[in-house]
Image: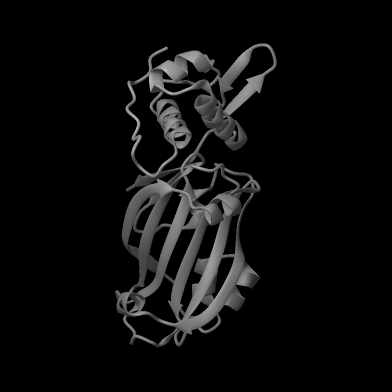
Amino acid sequence: MNTRAASLDRGGGIALWRQIADELRRDIVEGLLVEGAKLPPELALAERFAVNRHTVRAAIAALTAEGVLHAEQGRGTFIRRAPRISYALGRRTRFSTNLEGQARQTRRRLLDHAVEAADRQTAETLGIKPGASIVRLELIAEADGIPISRSTAWFDAERFPDMARTFRKTGSITAAFAAQGVSDYTRRSTMVSARHADPKTVEELGLSPGAIVLATEAIDEDVDGRAIELARTLFAADRVELTVG
């Protein structure tokens, strides 16, 4: 079984077991550890990463809790890589369309909502004055009952005063826009980055500590080129792969 040499950051702020878990995730994503294969013994991993076996066990425990690995009594620990959902980021990104054929049931649920004053950056993005009222929605997206993303979205409250109510009724941003006069819209831009999930995201998405999330910041616009939504979303990297096209 091939694995890549690893050099851990021993002076940084990320625990060694988290770094080891990240390296093993990368091995799985890159095909160095394949589904059904047996994980190398703890001693071999401890030698690879130059750590003690306790640190290796902590990484294995986290990945097992996350569902990436599974232990079989008397046999060892094996790779269990569930198929990841392919989520396309394009001009017409739509949640329900993206998951067609990949999940039996999908839904987006509203965690919280509020009307608040727009800060300067959000106001500039939405083309309104700083301090103007905006609607904020906090959302969780699920596929077959499993959380795959957590997002915060902002809308001009003057133009979309019923955003929270119509979303709660329809479960769809597209339908909520349509109910308020926007029959079509496209993606203006999407920025993507990756980072460790914070404790709140770990809890909301049911991840293990140290899990990686893919972060996007997206702006949607109407047919006249006017921004109608700013959304920041965190995708569980072990459950979703983002494709650009």
Q: Position of residue 102 (x, y in %)?
A: 55, 42
Q: Nearer the viewer, residue 21 or 94?
A: 21
Q: Position of residue 103 (x, y in %)?
A: 59, 44
Q: Is residue 142 above or below residue 17?
A: below
Left or right: where 155 falls relative to 245:
right
Q: Residue at image x 45%, y 19%?
A: 46
Is the N terminus in the top left, top right, bottom left or bottom right quadrant? top left
Quarter-wise, where is residue 241 in the image? top left
Q: Residue at image x 40%, y 48%?
A: 195
Mark yes or no: residue 182 visible: no
Left or right: where 29 falls relative to 64:
left
Mark yes or no: residue 146 visible: yes
Q: Is residue 57 above or below residue 14?
A: above
Q: Position of residue 144 (x, y in %)?
A: 64, 46
Q: Nearer the viewer, residue 245 or 62?
A: 62
Q: Is residue 205 above or below residue 225?
A: above
Q: Count the marks.
A: 0
**Which residue lies most toward the right here?**
73
Q: Position of residue 136 (x, y in %)?
A: 50, 74
Q: Nearer the viewer, residue 245 or 195?
A: 195
Instruction: Specify the color scheme.
Output: one colour
